[in-house]
Image (cartoon, rainbow, N blue to C red):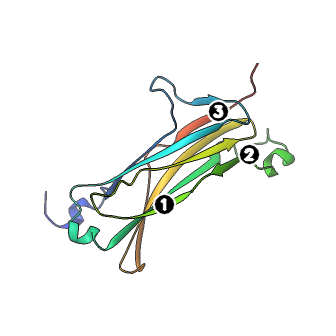
Amino acid sequence: EHKSFSSRICRPPVTLRVSIGRKESQSELVVSPGSFVEAVAHVSVQDWVPPRVLSHCSITIEFCCARKDSGSKELSLEEENNTPYVWCGQLRRTVDATEDENMDHRARVAFFQCGVFVVSACAKISGGGGIAEETWWAPHAETVKVEKEI
């Protein structure tokens, strides 16, 4: 591998993984309306990123959630316009991109409507006094299915 950055251009400078307490054997986490899920973003900087670059950067970790079936004809206008979920806690956390800093972040999301939702996170790397910025998303989102108890 060539030592220039261009040979690594497709490799993200951060590793980002989102977890919501789902067991490995489950494809989705099933909860009832009114329940909350604790989302955790596990972030670390790749070892190939030079320390001199890290010293001038900050990383902002941010959560997001979306209804998977948004815009579907099965949802009434009222359901589409009501708030299906609410984040509790800090959605964003900004840290210095130094190697010794713990960059994990957590927040809770409470669900109020039935449906299938995806929870993910991104890491926004800022440097050069805010002039340069990159956003890297977690490669896999977690799925939450909200359904009424039988």
Dot 1, how many residues are within 10 Å of its Cα: few (below 14), some (14-19), or many (20+)? Answer: some
From the viewer's side, name the closer residue of 65 and 51.
Answer: 51
From the image, state whether disc 1 or disc 2 is nearer to you: 1
- Pointer 3 residue: 145
Question: Residue 110's image quarter?
Answer: top right
Q: Amino acid at mark 1?
A: Arg
Q: Is residue 138 above or below residue 132?
A: above
Label 1 sits on a secondary structure element that is strand
Please identify the residue farthest to the left as the structure is shown: 2
Residue position for label 1? 93
Point out the frontmost of discs 3 and 1: 1
Horizontally, is 49 left or right of 74 in the view? left
Which mark, residue 81?
A: none
Q: Is residue 2 left or right of residue 20?
A: left
Mark 2, other Cα within 10 Å: few <14 / some 14–19 / many ≥20: some
The residue located at (79%, 48%) in the rendering is 80
Which residue is at a point 21% across and 65% down the rendered structure image? 50
Report the front residue among 99 and 116: 99
Task: Label 3, secondary structure: give it.
Answer: strand
State the residue at coordinates (41%, 71%): 133
Which numbered dot is residue 84? 2
In this view, 116 is above or below 122? above
Q: Amino acid at mark 3?
A: Lys
Mark 1 → mark 2, Cα distance in angstroms: 24 Å
| Residue occupying the far top of the picture | 150
Q: Is residue 15 left or right of residue 1?
A: right
First in residue order: circle 3 vs circle 2: 2
Q: Earlier in the sequence, mark 1 or mark 2?
A: 2
Q: In the depicted view, which residue is nearer to us: 32 or 131?
A: 32
Question: In x, y percent, where is residue 96?
Answer: 36, 66
